[in-house]
Image (cartoon, rainbow, N blue to C red):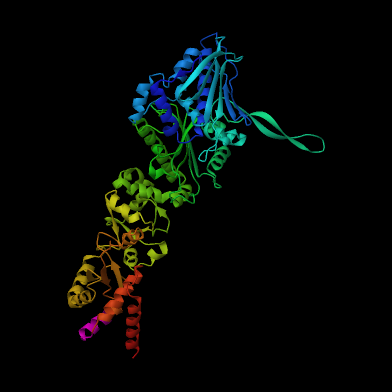
Amino acid sequence: MAVKQFKTESKRLLDLMANSIYTNTDIFLRELISNASDALDKRHYLSLTDESIPDEKPYIRIGIDKKNRIITIADNGIGMNKEELENNLGTIAKSGSSDFKEALEKGEEVDIIGQFGVGFYSAFMVAKKIEVLTRKPNEEKAYSWVSESEEGYEIKTASKEEAGTLITLTLKDNTKEKKYDKYLDKDEVRSLIKRYSDYIRYPILMNVDVVKPSDKEGHTETVEEEQTVNSMIPLWKKTKKDIKDEDYDNFYQSRYYDYVKPLKTIHYKVEGNTSYTALLFIPGSRPYNYFTNDYKAGLSLYSRGVFIKDEAKELISDHFRFVRGIVDSDDLNLNISREILQQDHQMAALRKSIDKKVRSTLVNMLEKEREDYEKFFDQFGVQLKYGAYDNFGEHKDELIDLLLFKSTYEDKYVTLKEYVSRMKEDQKEIYYAGGESLEAIKKLPQMEKVLDKGYEVLYFTDSVDEFMTTILREYDGKAFKSIQKGELDLDTEEEKNEIREKEETSKDLLEKIKDVLKDDVSEVRLSKRLVSYPVCLVSDENLSFEMERVLKDLNQNGIRASRILEINPDHPIFLALQKAFEDKKDISDYAKVLYDQALLIAGLPIEDPEDFSRRLSDLLLKAMN
């Protein structure tokens, strides 16, 4: 019988698939097993309505012939007759290969998951010859389909005792780039089945090597034994009441190689326009590479138990990227390779649903399992803060009530809601202070007056905190206010009048100090926030010193916060400075030392340490003489 030619469109599409669409050759086995599973589904369905099609115990059997470089995939499913072989394998895509090819080349997605003729051709990535022996259960004739290249194929009448399909792949010879021998290794093939097809609902049978005792003396021998190598029933498909906590923990730890149990397991099912089952985990510890490019965020996607894609970022928003787990849906539109998702309303709806579930779980933890939530926040809280800041606060309303901050209220975590509930009656703003650590913030000169007045202060220790407040702006009508920026309205009218009088009498002195420091500061003023410290540095209402430090770490060295030198009018240093100025002494060295001192207190570098040391030594000598 003459070799039949593939249609021109099919040949071009076959070449496109083998060389472009399927970048990972391993998935050929997944495709053939999925097709076998589809064939078993069809046989079972037809057996319910057609008495001529008996329903038998289903199987998918994988065979390896290392010597002849052959791998086989057999099933006892619905099989094909000659016409179906022509339609399914002779012409790729039953809907018309020309239309199919045009859609693909235009970048359009084509929903053909489960259609035999497309996934089948992924086998040409690894095989130089493909043979298909098949028979339908209600027909006597069997047929053989053989192809050795994209040029053509041959169909013959054949003999097959059992209904179903047997696919025989003769593997290509190894090249420098590709080692096809690995598909003849039992352990490798078994590993691929576990990875891609572990949750196919039918048993996948395979001969594996088993060590058994050979005699009474304890000697052993290795024998081949046929075993089911897939688990068939996914954990996430089981009824929750039949699953123990340790089952979830073991699944998570073995799948994600984590020695710490998950902090929270989320197992649920949604039915609707896009139905799906999800098994999600909030890790108990942050992966060592979480903040690096090596960390792979996203969920694993399955469709009808078939593994489709790992690290599917499309399934969950970036602010929840710490969530690990699996989503299994029957309703997703997938493209030809079963690897790339359509970016359509289905995916958007799915992501929205998953985000909503994760958020509600976190809210419940915060309200009812505070200790566990704080453990979670220690590990991943900064991700939520970035989420509130990202994209100009697109998700801030969704995340703001999940944020925690340490505060001067017992040094414990507080929510913004809790902070506002404790605000003093006359308090208009939410006060915060930024620094590299709690200890550094507690030592800030600016803290004294605020605490003396009885106000609670949030500690901002994450680099994103202050940037985030520029997006959040306020909470419950209360604006965020840094105690290190701008003016603080903490004083009574009597105290304000007193400072005004001191500013007036010290006007010339302040102008002199500003003139000395004109290259360093934008303003010199008497402080309304200092109690025991002589000086401090503050910035204006825009960029803070902490934000400057963060930008510098990002190599944004040209961006600098304004520097305002505040002097404590009640400190002995200022009184001595006033006297020296009144006595017509040069106060330049005093002014520069005070400025450098303020820099040190603020955790900022001194531009000329040697000059600071010299001036300080000279002033000490003068004081001692």
Q: Is residue 33 left or right of residue 618?
A: right
Against 318, is 344 above or below? above
Q: Is residue 511 left or right of residue 293?
A: left
Q: Kindly tell me whether residue 222 is visible in this rendering.
A: yes
Against 135, is 562 above or below? below
Residue 78 in percent (x, y) is at: 53, 16
Q: Is residue 580 magenta?
A: yes
Against 614, is 519 above or below? above
Residue at x 53%, y 24% (from the top left corner): 130
Residue 63 in percent (x, y) is at: 61, 27
Magenta segment, prevailing SS (helix, strand or loop): helix
**Which portion, as a residue range, is magenta?**
574-585
Picture mark count: 0
Against 534, is 265 above or below? above
Residue 570 in percent (x, y) is at: 28, 75
Q: Quadrant of residue 609?
A: bottom left
Q: Is residue 257 left or right of residue 419?
A: right
Residue at x 36%, y 49% (from the top left corner): 386
Residue 480 in percent (x, y) is at: 29, 55
Q: Kindly tell me whether residue 108 is visible in this rendering.
A: no
Q: Quadrant of the C terminus?
A: bottom left
Residue at x 42%, y 29% (from the top left corner): 15
Q: Quadrant of residue 102?
A: top left
Q: Which one is in front, 3 or 168?
A: 3
Q: Is residue 462 left or right of residue 538?
A: right
Q: Which one is in front, 581 or 124?
A: 124
